[in-house]
Structures are given as C-alpha cells and as structure tokens.
Image: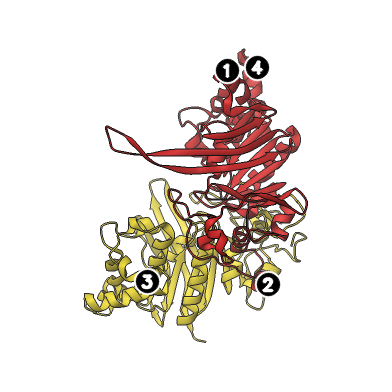
Chain colours: A yellow, B red
Amino acid sequence: MAGLLEVRNLSTHFSTKEGLIRAVEDVSFDLDAGETLGLVGESGCGKSVSAMSLMRLIPNPPGKIVNGEIVFEGRDLLKLGDEEIRHIRGNRMAMIFQEPMTSFNPVMTIGRQVAEPLEIHRNMTRNKAWTICADLLRRVRIPEAGKRLQSYPHQFSGGMRQRAMIAMALACTPRLIIADEPTTALDVTIQAQLLELMKQLTRDAGTALILITHNLGIVARYADRVNVMYAGRIVEKATVRALYADPRHPYTVGLMASIPRLDQDVKRKLRPIPGQPPDLLHPPSGCAFHPRCRNRIPVCEIHRPALEKASDGHEVACWNPVREAPPCC
Amino acid sequence: MLLKVTDLAVYYPVYQGAVLKKKIAEVKAVDGVSFRIEEGKTLGLVGESGCGKTTTGRAVLRLEKPTAGEVLFSGEDISRCDNSQLRRLRRRMQIVFQDPMGSLDPRMTARDIIGEPLRIHGSTTNKGEYRDETDHLLEIVGLHPGMGERYPHEFSGGQRQRIGIARALSLRPHLIVCDEPVSALDVSIQAQIINLLEGLQERFHLTYLFIAHDLSVVRHISDHVAVMYLGNIVEIADRHTIYRRPLHPYTHALLSAVPIPDPVLESNREHLVIEGEVPGPLNPPSGCKFHPRCPRVEERCRTERPAMRGVSDGDHQVACHLVD
C-alpha cells in the first residue's frame, strides 16, 4: 500500500524567555492508508506538538517548525502556503482534540460547527450541509440527531461533545484523523464507547488514524503500530504485537513495568522508573533517558543513540537495549 | 473492624427562588452505602464521575454531614460525635487529595504544610522537636529534609503528592482516605506513589479507603473492591473475585472497558460496551438505577430496587435481580 504520510526529520522548537525548547526533535515516521498509529509517552514528550506540527497548527511565535518534511498524499505540507494548507486541514486531514469544551465555539450551535467544514470545503449550501450533518450525528450515535443540531455545546455532556467532534472530523471523509488524547477526560465506559466508535468508523471509511495517548492499554487494543516518544524524540518504533511481546528500549520496558494491569492476579510491587521526566530547557547530555535508565553504560552520557533496526519493522534508539522479554510480562 | 459504615446516606437539597427559598428536590449523592474495612487492609472504591465515591470518603471523615446512617470508627459513631470527640477522632483519620497543587497552601513551605497538623493538635511543643519530626516525615515519603524550606510550586507533581502524604501521616493516623491520589500524575510517577503508599501501609499498619476511577490501579492496591453506581454500591468482592467472577453487569462492563496492555490478550477478549451515559442524580431511574443501560434488563429491574446480598461466601455481595 502506498504511504499516506511520510514524516522526515521533523523538528519543532519553541523560543521562550528561559531559552529554547526542542519539543520535537528529528522525528521520522510513515503511515499507510487506513492504518492506526499509536503515539505514546508522558506529558511533555512531544506527542501533542508532533500532531500540531502535522496540522501546521503550531503558534508562531513562540513555536516554529525548524526542519523536516511532512509529505502527505505526495505533497510536502511544510512547503505549502497558508491558503493551500487550509484546503487540507479539516478536509483531507482532521483533528480530534482532548477537551471538547474548549475546542468548540460556545456561542455557535453544534450543527453550524459540524457543518462548517462541509460549507467551506465542499461549497455546500447551509441546508444541504445540515442534512448531511444530521446524518453524521446519527452515525456517531447521538440520539435525536436532527433536533440536537440546534443545541449549543454546553447543552451536551462531555461524551456527546466528543461524539460531535468525531462527526465534525469525519464530515469531509478525510484520509487521516489525528486524535490527541481523545478520551482522556471521559469516564471509562464512555471512553470504551468512543474508541470502539472511532475504530469502526475509520475502518469503514479506510481512514488512517494517529492515536495520541499515554495509556498503553488503549494502544494495545486499538493501534497497529506504535511510536514511543521521550523528551521530543522517538525512542522505539514497532508493531503493537512486537512492542508488547519484546520491548527493547529501557524506557518502554520501564513504562510497562510501572503500570498496574487489570489482569494481574498476584500482588506484586510495581517497578517505577526512578526520577522525573527531563526538563526540556536543560535536557540531559547524550541519551535523554540516561539519568533514569537501568541499562545505562558510559557511552549513554556522551553520545545520543540513533534509531536502529532491531528486527523487521522494529527500531530502537539505545546503546544497550533490553535483550529479552522482562520477567514481569 | 476499624471502620464499619452502615446505610450511609448524603443528600443535598436543591433550592428554588432567591428570597423565599423553597426546597424543590434532593440530590441523593450517596444513598444507602454499607461496607467495612479491617485494620491494615485496603478497600478500593471505584466508579465513574458522579457515582458518590468522593462524597462517601468525605462523609467517612465527616467532612460532609451524613443525612442518615452510621459510620463506626473503632466502635465510635462519627456521624453523631460532638466537636470535641470529633477533634480527637480526626487525629486518627486523614485524607490525601487528588490535586496536590490545589490542596497545598502555595504560601506555606513544605515543612509548615507537613507540620500544621502537629501545631493544631499540639503534639509537639518545642522547636527542635518540631524540626526533627518534620525532617523525619519528609524522609519517610522519600523527600530530602533540605527541601523543607521550599514552596509547593518548586516541587514536581509527584513530589507535591509526597508532601500531601507526609501531612496525612504527621499525626500517625490509623485510617487514610486516599481520594484519587495518583490520577493527576504521569504513568511513571504513578507507580512511585503507589509503591510509597503500599510501603507506608506495611510500615505503619495503615488502613486505606482508596478512591479512584482507574480499575487497574484500584485492583492493584486493594484487598477488597467496591463498585459504585449513582450513589449505591452495586458489588463488593475481594480483588481476585471482582476480576475473575464479576456478577453485576455494571462491574462486568467496567472491567471490559479497561484495556489491558497486551495486544494478544486484547484481541481475544470479550468487549462488552454498554450504551448510554450515566443519568443525572437528580432524577435517577426507577428500580435498579442501572437498568436503562443494562444489557440484561428484565421487567422487575424497572420497578424493584435490588438489595445488596451475599453470594457464595459472605464476602462477595451484589445488588442485582439476575444473580441467584
């Protein structure tokens, strides 16, 4: 299958009063049509900034994409003008944000907002767009969809707002949807409903999905491939099965050993990763993970390891990767 | 039995009108909740937002006045205590809050935050003793005593939660209510705090009421797990049974909604996704409150409220008509 998206050496920096923050540094990955890619990591690892960079939504200043290529459907998005990028955003590529209350306009009805991409990108009349909208809301299973078009965002529950957000993202049948922690703010049963819905709708339409989350369980259930990020860089890339069966980067292994698992019967101690995530204003030398790493060797403090092939479709950036499956799994 | 809660209820009145306020309704945040915790054990209280788990925790400490019911803390009924009795009992029961930034005074140093209970309850009088005691508390939670003079904003989220825990420990309590103590933290830091809480429990023989929405965290740390829905406990069982043999359809749905970080297991696992959302507590459904979302609903579920009853051994209790 032809690659839908190719990201090459993407770097996004922010200049702040305190200094330069390299939020995303030298990130490269590919995405095929219809595929679901998980982007995992903790707060500040650069997963959201990567997504915003793909959409060209980085506020400038203070942020700037300083390097790289984002080739989407054969065109480098970083070379396009503002007008051209607007034709892609919300049309060929759409985004679902974490907080549906702040990402909807509170003084516009849900219907107008969900219809907006259709009016803009498809030149539809408002009436036509509204008919399609009602249909979209039905597809995301909002009860009494026709009536709810007239509602304002505050009249919707958190789960309903997120459904409307999914409907809006799907409006122009994009080729790629980027979902940034789409269900983190929601209750677990609602979370499950929405993720199942997104999975089903993207599969039906053959839409590719980038799923950004800190939850390794969600990645295991919904993604095909995973990129693990730490301090602005990808430290491990693999298919979902390979990553969980055979994690190589000590950070990935550490993350897996530090989460309590629902199916774990014996009461065993968690093995937390010692220390704190790094301060990106003063990142550690060499490999950014070395101060917290159990596999550290002298070279880690001096040189940064590059992503290297560990096996087919599995890459890891580490001087001393974990060799075998850890005893915990 | 350190804590025995029987038919606890907390109702909030809903008023209409500005001058002549008229009570028009009641929100039954907690509506007849019973459980017990043995000394040195952990009961996990799990449920979605608005299910009444936090209110239950606060009522146990009498930070909310119960509308009805009994809260026996080592034999004394907290819901009927007068102020001086309450003051005495409160030394033995403490709380750790979810948001460490919101629950620590930004203008106080870490040492003063941790030492405040000591000052209030007058257990240390001279300065040297106060300093030694607060140093000791900082060490217990894994912070360097030299950090005592810093202010909350100078600490990371995980460190702030450690300060909250040190404050809760300062009076050597028996019971600690942990209200979502790790949900605001990053995954790798969560594990540090969970391990700290477990270690402290062992060391000081603490009893926890652990409130959280994350079922895998709750199952990890608890001996028993109680599942709440709209103000009621719908099922209680030990940590093994709640996962292996859940009986209430809601428990079942909740468990299956939590993804397990194992793609092979996930692809073979049955995913029961329940429809709809939690109804508002102002007009809860008739009969079993879960019936509008229940995949196995029957006629009597709509009219008859199921009572909690024991199944197999007395340890496992469930409130559902469909369980025999």
Residue at numbered disc 2:
B264
Instruction: Report x, y in % for residue B258.
Output: 60, 61
Q: Which subunit holds the residue at mark 1? A: B
Pick whichever of labels 1 and 4 is earlier in the sequence.
1
Q: Are marks 2 and 3 on the same chain?
A: no
Q: Is residue B236 at all visible to an observer of this figure?
A: yes
Q: Nearer the viewer, residue B68 or A205?
A: B68
CA separation in Å, label 1 and label 3: 58 Å
Labels 3 & 4 near each other (Cβ < 8 A): no
Residue at numbered disc 3:
A137
Residue B84 — which label?
1
**What amino acid is found at the position of numbered circle 2 in the picture?**
Val
**What amino acid is found at the position of numbered circle 1 in the picture?**
Ser
Pick whichever of labels 4 and 2 is earlier in the sequence.
4
Regarding mark 3 in the picture, which secondary structure is present there?
Answer: helix
Residue at numbered disc 4:
B129
CA separation in Å, label 2 and label 1: 58 Å
Q: Are marks 4 and 2 on the same chain?
A: yes
Labels 2 & 1 near each other (Cβ < 8 A): no
Which quadrant of the figure has residue B127? top right
**What amino acid is found at the position of numbered circle 3 in the picture?**
Leu
Vertical order, B18 against A298 (above or below): above
Q: Residues within 10 Å of mark 4 (few under 14, many from 20)?
A: few
Q: Are marks 1 and 3 on the same chain?
A: no
Q: Closer to the camera: disc 3 or disc 4?
A: 3
Q: Are marks 3 and 4 on the same chain?
A: no
Instruction: Report x, y in % for residue B16.
Output: 32, 40
Q: Is residue A273 at all visible to an observer of this figure?
A: no
Q: Residues within 10 Å of mark 2 (few under 14, many from 20)?
A: some
Regarding mark 4 in the picture, which secondary structure is present there?
Answer: helix
CA separation in Å, label 1 and label 4: 26 Å
